[in-house]
Image (tube, rainbow, N blue to C red):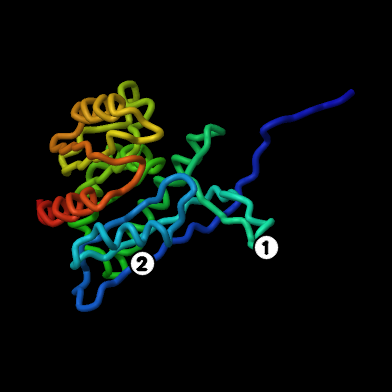
Amino acid sequence: MENLQTDRELTAEIKLYYDLLLPENVKTPAPLLIAVHGYGGNKRQMMREARSLAPENFVVAALQGFHQHWRESTAEKGMMPKVGFAWLTNYKSEESVAVHHRVVSDLIQHLIAEGVADQRQIFLLGFSQSCALNFRFAFSNPELLSGVVGISGGIPGDWETSELYQKLNAPVLYVYGDADEFYPLEKFDENANKLKLRAANLESKGYQAKHEITLEMRENVKTWLRNNLGA
C-alpha cells in the first residue's frame, strides 16, 4: 500500500551576506544604520541607497535576502539573467520571518562585539517588502534599537491581533509616495494611524512619489537620523 508522507523536514545551514561601510575618519564604535532591501533587490543596490541616506558619521550595513530568483531573462541579448533576492513568500512565511529576525539580531551583536557599532545607536531601515519585517523585529525587540525607518512598505498583517508586539519608545519614521504602484495612499495613511497604537514617537509623511526613494525622502531621512542620535 502506498504511503505518502508530506512536509517532512531537514534543517540545513545557509549563509546570509551583507556589505559593510566604514567611512573614512569615523571613530568606532559609531552609530549603525542597518539597511534592508525590498523584493528583487540586493545588498549592493541597498548600500547605494543607504549611503545617500546615512549621515557622515554612521557605519552602514546592507543585508541581502536569502530567497534567490531570476528577475528577468536577457538570454536573447547574450547576457546572464539578473538575480534578485527577497525575504519571504507566502509559503511558511513564519519561518522566513524567524530567519530575518535572527540575522538582524546576530548582525547587531556581531558588529557591537567587533567594536564597530555603538550599541546605544542602532538604527534599522527597510524599503518595500522589508518594511513590515523590520517593524515586526523592532516592536518585538524594543530594547535593541534606537530608531526605525520604514519606506514605501506595509505593516505586519497581525499588527492588531498579535501579542508579540510591544510599545516602542524609540522614534519611528514612516514615509511613502502618493502615487505608489503597489499601495494606495489611503492604505499608507491607515498604516500610519495603526503604528500609533504602539509607537510612542512616530513621524509619518507622504511625498509626491511612486514606489521609490526620492531625493526629498533621502534628505528627510538623513535629517531625521541626525536629529535622533542620542535620543
Q: Is residue 161 left or right of residue 98?
A: left
Which amino acid type is marked by label 2?
Leu
> Which class describes the residues within 10 Å of circle 2: few (<14), some (14-19), or many (20+)?
some
Residue placed most toward the observer, 197 or 217: 217
x, y percentage for residue 128? Answer: 38, 42
Judged from the image, the secondary structure of the residue bearing numbered disc 2 is strand
- Judge depth for marks 2 and 1 and give the one in front: 1
Whether residue 203 sits left or right of residue 116 in the image: it is left
Specify whether 196 is left or right of 73: left
Which residue is most to the top? 161
Q: Residue at x 27, y 28 (%)?
A: 191
Given the current orientation, which residue lies at the most extreme front position?
77
- Residue 108 at x, y = what percent? 32, 57
For the point 36% across and 31% down, the residue is 183
Instruction: Identify the residue position indicated by label 1 in the image.
Output: 78
Quick one: label 2 or label 1, which is nearer the N terminus? 2
Asked which quadrant contains residue 156, the reply is: top left
Q: Nearer the viewer, residue 143 or 78?
A: 78
Q: Quadrant of the N terminus?
A: top right
- Residue 20 shows which numbered tag? 2
* Residue 222, image quadrant: bottom left
Question: Which disc, if any, is residue 170?
Answer: none
Q: Are marks 2 and 1 in contact (CB under 8 Å)?
A: no
